[in-house]
Image: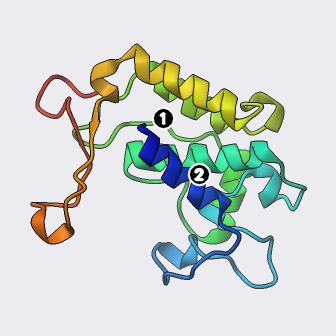
Amino acid sequence: LDEHTCGEIAAILNEETATDHGDSTESGARLTRDGAVVGTPLYMSPEQARGMPTTERSDLYALAVVLYEWLAGRPPFSGRAEQVMRAHVFDRPPLLVPRAGFRVSEALIDVVGRGLAKEPAERFGSAAEMRRALDAAMASDPVAAAAEIDTSPPEARPSATLRLSAVGGGPSR
């Protein structure tokens, strides 16, 4: 992940309010429901889904969900809000299978897996620690790490996709 992408992810995690963009998944799993645990079910840490206090490690869990979704093209858990919250608490995330054209190193999969640990103590202790692990994972496989993001206006792009240098340049994991 480059500085710009990491900055965007940090900005998303630091937002104090959520914007309702409509029901974008089955039964509103992306939306916070009134009278329920506060948060967006797809990105809730297990402790948040259980109504427990949250910490920085809870935010790092949410970041790991974002990374999983970015790499796999789908979140680790989906379904109705209650099903997703239950899955965050009890289910192991499915094996991260990179979306078409993405080559993802084992080291990066390990970082995401540690970020998705059910117990907060098993996750990274701080954002700085997670960042160091991400940097090391990306350095372990420079081909998989070389992301090219098209920043031209949408109307000038053939498509609004993230392209990796490994596309067409070798087997995807």
Q: Is residue 58 above or below residue 158?
A: above
Residue 26 position, x and y percent, is 49, 74
Q: Which residue shows up at 57% across the image and 60% down it? A: 12
Q: Is residue 108 above or below residue 34?
A: above
Q: Which residue shows up at 49% across the image and 54% down it? A: 8
Apparent side of residue 138 relative to residue 59 in the rendered image (left or right): left
Task: Specify the label residue 95 is tagged with.
Answer: 1
User: As shown in the figure, which amino acid type bears the numbered disc 2?
Assistant: Ala
Residue 149 position, x and y percent, is 27, 47
The N terminus: image quadrant: top left
Q: Earlier in the sequence, mark 1 or mark 2?
A: 2
Q: Secondary structure at mark 1?
A: loop
Residue 38 position, x and y percent, is 77, 71
- The colour scheme used to paint the residues is rainbow
Task: Specify the label residue 159 is tagged with.
Answer: none
Q: Mark 2 highlights which residue?
A: 10
Query: In which image quadrant can residue 120 be found?
Result: top right
Res. 76 visible in picture:
no
